[in-house]
Amino acid sequence: MGVQSSDLLDVERIREDFPILQREFGGEQLIYLDNAATSQTPEPVVETIADYYRTTNANVHRGLHQLSHEASIAYEEAHDRVAAFIGAEGREEIVFTKNTTESMNLVAYAWGLNELGPGDEVVLTEMEHHAALVTWQQIAKRTGATVRYIEVDEDGYLDMDHARELIGPDTAMVSVVHISNTLGTVNPVADLADLAHDHDAYIFVDGAQSAPTRPVDVQDIDADFFAFSGHKMCGPTGIGVLYGKERILEEMEPYLYGGEMIRKVTFDDSTWNELPWKFEAGTPVIAQGIALAEACDYLDDIGMDRVRRHEEALAEYTYDRLEEFENIEVYGPPGDDRGGLVAFNLGAVHAHDTSEILNEFAVAVRAGDHCTQPLHDKLGTPASARASFYIYNTREEVDALVDALGETRDLFA
């Protein structure tokens, strides 16, 4: 059943940094398996947020006093830290946003509205999150561009032959999820980047499920844009990241206007600040950005290769355990070829009912369409239950999940 997770990480030591995992519901200790939605936040990150507000709270780039100076340095250095975490060339390529969705919208509005027109095509995949699918649909309606979709085969993989057919001379943007938040599929984004660049198109990689769980090098992928969220990688909510190649960001118009993003303002016109502040209008996410840098330190201290191996091992173990059930549908690639999540349906039991019963055992999973309604339509189901793993999860918790699913099956028999 694959490598045991205990061989990869000192999970018990890691769990000490997450006191929320000691909570009990109905006499049962919490088993948190909803990490693809939001991970838990370790004490060092919580302390970083608290310490900022206790000692350094001031607006950045706005004052000459000591607090503003200290906050500005910490906030700027946070961009440097995040840039190093994903292999960007520098802070100029790192824009802090609220989340992956806002990062997607920033590019769609700042680049898409200005660059797309009738005859242009945006190529997505059938497994895209609504953050990409809905956003590019709306931009296409406004610009006259066309959205096309790379098909997903019956095993949950992208049909790369179809990708090569779709990505052509009319393609302006390829927007693809790195790891599907429903199927667990790890997409060949570097190959898709090559296809896009062969036709002078850009590629936007949705890294919401990959940046928290494996080493990412945006230069190695050759992504033009890459986005992810802090709250899925031990960081706080309210902070997201947009990476963009510096030359592209320089050419783009701002998405939001106001203070901070300007260089000079007159009654007749305005000029824009240097990168990345050009895209960070108003008071930015200061505490969140500094805390995200701490989350990067926390994960790098563990080792992102080890994080990847740990969660993939748990996903494979879960996949194998679920296969013990006679009447279960597990979605996506085989257990040994997926990211750290498993979506499934237990016979005719609705995913919402499954989640409710699991909750009685203090097992927290996600139930619904996971913001992938078109993909669920293709799968022939309105919803699925999803267990997703992170650095503090164990095989014993997977066993508890399986036991609770057995109880669920018997209840609906």
Image (tube, rainbow, N blue to C red):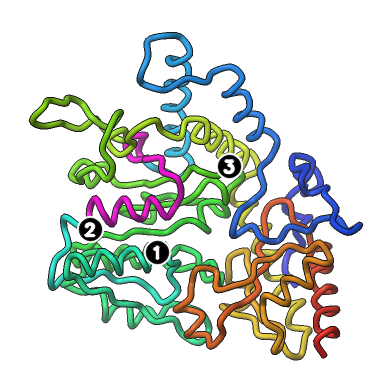
- Between the C-alphas of marks 1 and 2, the distance is 21 Å
Q: Amino acid at mark 3?
A: Gly
Q: Secondary structure at mark 3?
A: loop
Label 1 or label 3, whichever comes before in sequence order: 1
Label 3 CA crowd tier, 10 Å (few <14, some 14–19, many 20+): many
Give me the disc on residue 11. none
User: Which image quadrant for residue 259?
Assistant: top left
Q: Amino acid at mark 1?
A: Val
Q: Could you say which is closer to the camera, residue 196 or residue 129?
A: 129
**Residue at 53% of width from left, 45% of height from top?**
230
Q: Nearer the viewer, mark 1 or mark 2?
A: 2
Give me the disc on residue 112. 2
Label 1 CA crowd tier, 10 Å (few <14, some 14–19, many 20+): many
Q: Residue furthest right?
A: 27
Residue 393 lies, in percent from the top left, at 74, 56
Residue 161 lies, in percent from the top left, at 34, 82
Which quadrant, please, contains the N terminus?
bottom right
Specify start and end residues of the magenta stretch as a single range.
89-111
**Relative horizontal placement of residue 148, taking residue 271 as reference (left or right):** right
Q: Residue furthest left?
A: 268
Q: Amino acid at mark 2?
A: Gly
Q: Secondary structure at mark 1?
A: helix
The residue tagged 3 is 235
The residue tagged 1 is 189
Residue 37 lies, in percent from the top left, at 59, 58
Label 3 or label 2, whichever comes before in sequence order: 2
Label 1 or label 2, whichever comes before in sequence order: 2
- Between the C-alphas of marks 3 and 2, the distance is 29 Å
Q: Secondary structure at mark 2?
A: helix
The image shows residue 336, relative to residue 313, as above or below, that is below
**Residue at 35% of width from left, 78% of height from top?**
150
Q: Nearer the viewer, mark 1 or mark 3?
A: 3
